[in-house]
Image (cartoon, rainbow, N blue to C red):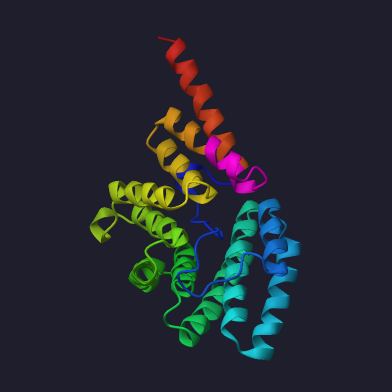
Amino acid sequence: MKAILLVVIIHGFILGRPAHSAQVSNDHTEVVAARKARDRASVEALQKAVASAREEAARTGGFEANLRLALFEVWLCEAAEAHNNNKLFKQAAQEGVRAAEKAVELNPQSSDAHQLLGDLLSQLIPHVFGGGMRYGKRSTDEMDKAIELDPKNVNAYVSRAISYYYTPESFGGSKPKALAMLKQAVEIDALADSPHIWLALFYLDARQTDAAAREIDLARKANPERTFTSYVYRQVEAAAKKSGVQKSSH
């Protein structure tokens, strides 16, 4: 994995929340299996899940199949990043965008479809020439639309927060807004792991080690199996040790 300041925006996730809009079923057999594969960063298992979802989407042309395919491609991005496989990451993001675009076309009122499309477009930004100019505004517009359609869509708040954080201020970025959106996501669902993971990363970037440790501990309690969480936990531990050495040297 890359250092914290070079972390590619990897934030595939699905959280239990009220069904305010059409969304992927948390209880769907393939979703449960794919989520476990994401947690283990198992590229092979996720590629199988993607292939199955792609076949169903091609066969049925249905909204749910395309939405599920887009979700699995997001999760494949996370697994690819864990293995430093940039080629696979870019491919998954590109194919995921196509599936998410189809889902939005089939159901423009789906908050999850807009969130996944915005998320996947943001995944592409560092992997294509002029990515920020090509996909930045479109990505944030899709995330904003997702929140507009469902103000309780935790996924959308996390995606938008990451966008705010890593976008330069001159292009509309805002670290205070990013933190505020993550805190709002926690208020909506305190048991979701992703808001806590990203709060930990943001606090770590700001050298607020104690706050980062608190958030990553909450993420580990929510989902101790996720590889991404373990990675961030190790970064927090390393920063805490370094801070302790620096303090003891004075």
Q: Is residue 218 magenta?
A: yes
User: At 41% across and 61% down in the image, what residue appears?
Assistant: 152
Q: Is residue 17 above or below residue 203?
A: below
- Please, what is the dominant secondary structure of the magenta stretch? helix
Residue 102: % across, % down: 52, 84
Camera-side residue of 250 and 44: 44
Residue 250: % across, % down: 40, 9
Q: Is residue 156 above or below residue 165?
A: below
User: At 54% across and 48% down in the image, what residue appears?
Assistant: 193
Please state if 28 lies on the left or on the right of 106 as rendered. right
Please state if 64 lies on the left or on the right of 18 as rendered. right
Q: Quadrant of residue 118?
A: bottom left
Please state if 132 lies on the left or on the right of 95 as rendered. left
User: At 50% across and 87% down in the image, what residue appears?
Assistant: 106
Residue 156: % across, % down: 43, 62
The span shown in magenta is: 217-229
